Image (cartoon, rainbow, N blue to C red):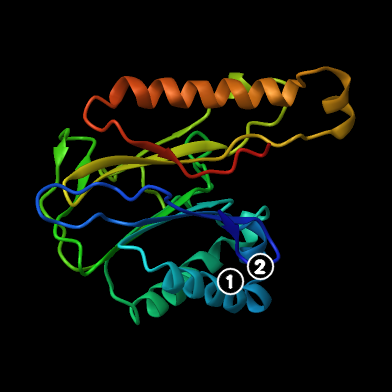
């Protein structure tokens, strides 16, 4: 694991064990990136170019065949004012990645902050390399694989509740009765990459709203809330995950 040299929280994992592929295909290397990008959307003029250069540099250096980028706090903390910067981020990212050998692009950006019961501010972005022999995505509505993906960009933004190739949920309000209902939640996709199925889960857990309250008890009320949300997600994904034995959480736990 390594951190990108940017002024906000970004972590990157290069899989230590390459994904086994069926048949005569070589193993498939994955690169998994999680980034809390709230500051990026609030100050894109200063940070966007820096972030993109560092991201592209590391993606090129690692040279994976499949790249997963999970974002938290899409639109920033003041999302009512800065959500408009998301589309520029997508445009710039796609322009830079078009210069590489990644030819399959899937983007899910939960931007609809007016939907209080659904908004999570999560973003799941995936890039598939031209050398991948088989790449398919799971349809959670039909409970089957969609056909082999064509080359090009598939971008889902704004209100993405009805997009069937992802599962997304906001944590129930009763998980944090003492606090304002947070936009925290999770978003999952399932991929078949060269014959191997894998679930990729983006999850954003609660932070410590008060350091004083966090020190009163051990474990703190915030720690208990994070655990409740994580267990809820693991159990929900586990019950539904009868096909893929591989589940990876690429996340911001706010530990």
Is 88 left or right of 105, judged from the image as shown? right
- Within 10 Å of disc 2 (Cα), the crowding (few <14, some 14-19, many 20+) is some
**Are circles 2 and 1 on residues that touch, CB within 8 Å?**
yes
- Which label is found at residue 222? none
Residue 174 visible in the shown view:
yes
State which quadrant residue 38 falls in. Answer: bottom right
At x 43%, y 67%, the residue is: 62
At x 72%, y 28%, the residue is: 179
Mark found first going from the N terminus, 2 or 1 = 2
At x 56%, y 40%, the residue is: 204
Work out how far the residue at label 2 is from the one at label 1, CA to CA, in angstroms. Answer: 6 Å
Q: Is residue 151 above or below residue 193?
A: below
Q: Position of residue 223 (x, y in %)?
A: 70, 25
- Which label is found at residue 51? 1
The front one of 53 and 123 is 53
Q: Position of residue 32 (x, y in %)?
A: 44, 53
- Within 10 Å of disc 1 (Cα), the crowding (few <14, some 14-19, many 20+) is many
SS at mark 1 in the image:
helix
Is 194 left or right of 40, judged from the image as shown? left
Residue 154 visible in the shown view:
no
Q: Position of residue 234 (x, y in %)?
A: 44, 25
Q: Position of residue 82 (x, y in %)?
A: 61, 63
Q: Give the mark count.
A: 2
The front one of 223 and 166 is 223
SS at mark 2 in the image:
loop
Is 120 left or right of 244, judged from the image as shown? right
State which quadrant residue 237 falls in. Answer: top left
Which residue matches tag 2?
6
| Quadrant of the frame with the C terminus | top right
Q: Is residue 46 above or below residue 198?
A: below
């Amino acid at each position: 694991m390594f951190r990108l040299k940017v002024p906000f929280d970004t972590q990157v994992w290069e899989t230590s064990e390459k994904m086994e592929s069926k048949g005569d295909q070589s193993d498939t290397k994955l690169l998994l990136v999680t980034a809390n990008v709230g500051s990026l959307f609030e100050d894109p003029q200063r940070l966007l170019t820096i972030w993109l250069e560092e991201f592209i540099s590391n993606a090129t250096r690692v040279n994976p065949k499949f790249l997963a980028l999970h974002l938290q706090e899409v639109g920033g903390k003041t999302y009512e004012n800065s959500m408009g910067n998301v589309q520029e981020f997508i445009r710039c990212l796609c322009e830079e990645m078009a210069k590489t050998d990644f030819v399959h692009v899937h983007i899910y950006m939960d931007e609809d902050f007016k939907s209080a019961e659904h908004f999570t501010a999560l973003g799941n972005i995936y890039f598939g390399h031209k050398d991948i022999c088989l790449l398919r995505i799971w349809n959670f509505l039909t409970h089957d694989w969609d056909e082999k993906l064509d080359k090009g960009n598939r971008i889902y933004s704004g209100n993405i509740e009805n997009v069937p190739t992802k599962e997304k949920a906001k944590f129930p309000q009763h998980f944090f009765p003492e606090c304002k209902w947070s936009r925290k939640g999770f978003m999952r996709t399932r991929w078949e990459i060269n014959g191997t199925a894998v679930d990729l889960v983006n999850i954003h857990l609660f932070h410590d709203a008060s350091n004083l309250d966090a020190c009163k008890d051990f474990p703190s009320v915030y720690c208990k809330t994070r655990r409740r949300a994580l267990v809820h997600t693991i159990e929900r994904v586990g019950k539904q995950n009868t096909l893929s034995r591989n589940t990876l959480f690429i996340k911001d736990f706010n530990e």
